[in-house]
Image (cartoon, rainbow, N blue to C red):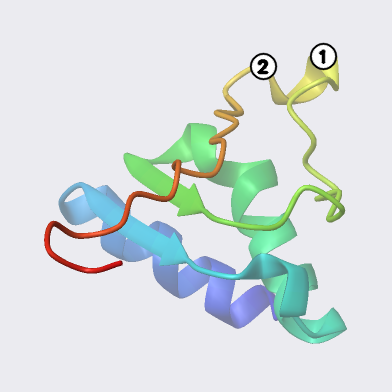
């Protein structure tokens, strides 16, 4: 897993890097370890990591931890349901 984190950090030293991890609530332990390493070392490079997950998932890099002050959490609420016009 360290090799994956090193690869991402090396790429980000050359140019800004966007990483997207969708549905992190289904992540396997090895991938979680890799992303945790990346988050721990993100200050070394220009990386924007966007992670989506369900409310019951608690990432190890939780934004409430002071050591991870670079993390922000944006909570999205479900959109209201509206029937399309002409459908009853």
The answer to whether residue 31 is above or below residue 69 is below
Q: Would you say 81 lies left or right of 57 here?
A: left
The answer to whether residue 64 is above or below residue 57 is above
Q: Would you say 55 lies left or right of 41 here?
A: right
**Which type of secondary structure does the marked residue at label 1 adopt?**
helix
The residue where tag 1 is placed is: 66
**What residue sits 34% from the left and 49% below the top?**
82
The residue where tag 2 is placed is: 69
Which quadrant of the figure has residue 57? bottom right
Q: Quadrant of the N terminus?
A: bottom right
Q: How would you rate the neighbour count of disc 1 (Cα within 10 Å): few for under 14, some for 14-19, many for 20 or more?
A: few
Count of numbered tags? 2
Q: Would you say 64 lies left or right of 8 here?
A: right
In this view, the residue in front, 34 or 64, is 64
**Which type of secondary structure does the marked residue at label 2 adopt?**
loop
**What residue sits 43% from the left and 50% below the top?**
81
The spot of residue 54 in percent (x, y) is: 71, 56
In this view, the residue in front, 80 or 41, is 80
In this view, the residue in front, 79 or 84, is 84
The spot of residue 59 in percent (x, y) is: 80, 50
The spot of residue 88 in percent (x, y) is: 30, 67
**What residue sits 74% from the left and 78% below the top?**
27
Which quadrant of the figure has residue 2? bottom right
The spot of residue 45 in percent (x, y) is: 38, 41
Q: How would you rate the neighbour count of disc 2 (Cα within 10 Å): few for under 14, some for 14-19, many for 20 or more?
A: few
Q: CA distance from mark 2 to mark 1?
A: 5 Å
In this view, the residue in front, 35 or 23, is 23
The answer to whether residue 65 is above or below residue 49 is above
Instruction: Answer whether labels 2 and 1 touch (C-beta < 8 Å).
Output: yes
**What residue sits 13% from the left and 57% below the top?**
85
The residue furthest front is 88
**What is the number of the mark on residue 53?**
none
């Amino acid at each position: 897993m360290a090799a994956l984190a090193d690869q991402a950090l090396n790429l980000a030293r050359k140019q800004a890097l966007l990483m997207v991890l969708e549905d992190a609530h289904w992540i396997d332990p090895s991938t979680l370890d890799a992303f945790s390493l990346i988050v721990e070392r993100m200050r070394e490079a220009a990386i924007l990591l966007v992670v989506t997950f369900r409310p019951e998932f608690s990432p190890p890099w939780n934004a409430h931890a002071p050591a991870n002050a670079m993390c922000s959490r944006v909570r999205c609420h479900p959109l209201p349901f509206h029937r399309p016009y002409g459908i009853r």
